Amino acid sequence: SQQGEEDPQALSIQEGENATMNCSYKTSINNLQWYRQNSGRGLVHLILIRSNEREKHSGRLRVTLDTSKKSSSLLITASRAADTASYFCATGYNAGNNRKLIWGLGTSLAVNP
Amino acid sequence: DTAVSQTPKYLVTQMGNDKSIKCEQNLGHDTMYWYKQDSKKFLKIMFSYNNKELIINETVPNRFSPKSPDKAHLNLHINSLELGDSAVYFCASSLSNGQGGYTFGSGTRLTVV
């Protein structure tokens, strides 16, 4: 399978808690991206981390990348009910002259008020 | 201003019909994509165009025909619709230089009855 794999598939936490989602992949990559999808909506780009980077922050989001383990994690701190969504990782790599993304199946996050 | 807009948002049609979905982006991106998301939320790339040139065609039935009149537009025409075509179709765009992530449209929910 060419899919990235997110772990866990579903996560339910209380507001204020931190949420951690993991992504593992199989090929060498140029970058790894995290997206959020609210129910019935399109995907929203959150963070892109390049293969030579190890950590990146954006507001309450922290992404780490370990290329030796072929894995990444997304941490959402001080979660809010509005963070309830599905979170997808996508790995970017070169395929000949094209750049491709391989998508995971997503983690469904529920933040309970 | 909507960055990636696709129409229609909902489409209900009978088997055997032909339908089109339109997509436009005003971000100045040079690459556009069509994705299909099934009921299990798996995102599958269908087509990718770079500056009006088809660069990715992922084993999609030839009933699906994309058309890119210019780099800001990518339309999807589907002939002889089948029940299995029911899904949400997302248009997306990006820069081919790998800067930034993808910007997605809000999706077209296609239901074939």
Image: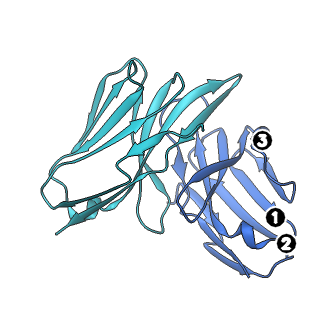
Chain colours: A cyan, B blue
Q: Amino acid at mark 3?
A: Lys
- Which of the labelled discs sits on residue B78, or is there none? 1
Label whose residue precedes the other's in the sequence (2 or 1): 2
Q: Quadrant for residue A95, please give it.
A: top right
Callout 1 crowding tier (Cα within 10 Å): few <14, some 14–19, many ≥20: some
Instruction: Residue A11 in the image: state x and y as whole percent.
Output: 29, 56
Instruction: Residue B68 in the image: state x and y as whole percent.
Output: 78, 49
Identify the residue at image location x=34%, y=40%: A22
- Name the residue nearer the viewer: A67 or B35: A67
In the picture of the structure, the residue carrying the numbered disc 2 is: B18
- Total labels drawn: 3
Instruction: Residue B39 in the image: state x and y as whole percent.
Output: 56, 66
Q: Which secondary structure lies at badge 3?
A: loop
- Which of the labelled discs sits on residue A98, or is there none? none
Q: Are marks 2 and 1 on the same chain?
A: yes
Inspect this view and state whether residue B95 appears. no
Q: Amino acid at mark 1?
A: Ile
Q: Which secondary structure lies at badge 1?
A: strand
Q: Are marks 3 and 2 on the same chain?
A: yes
**Relative to A108, A92 lies left or right:** right
Q: Are marks 3 and 1 on the same chain?
A: yes
Q: Determine whether B18 is above or below A53 in the image.
A: below
Inspect this view and state whether residue B94 appears. yes
Q: Amino acid at mark 2?
A: Asp
Q: CA distance from mark 2 to mark 1?
A: 6 Å
In the picture of the structure, the residue carrying the numbered disc 3 is: B52
Which of pointers 3 and 1 indicates the residue nearer the eye? Answer: 1
Q: For the C terminus of chain A, which image quadrant?
A: bottom left
Q: Are marks 2 and 1 in contact (CB under 8 Å)?
A: yes
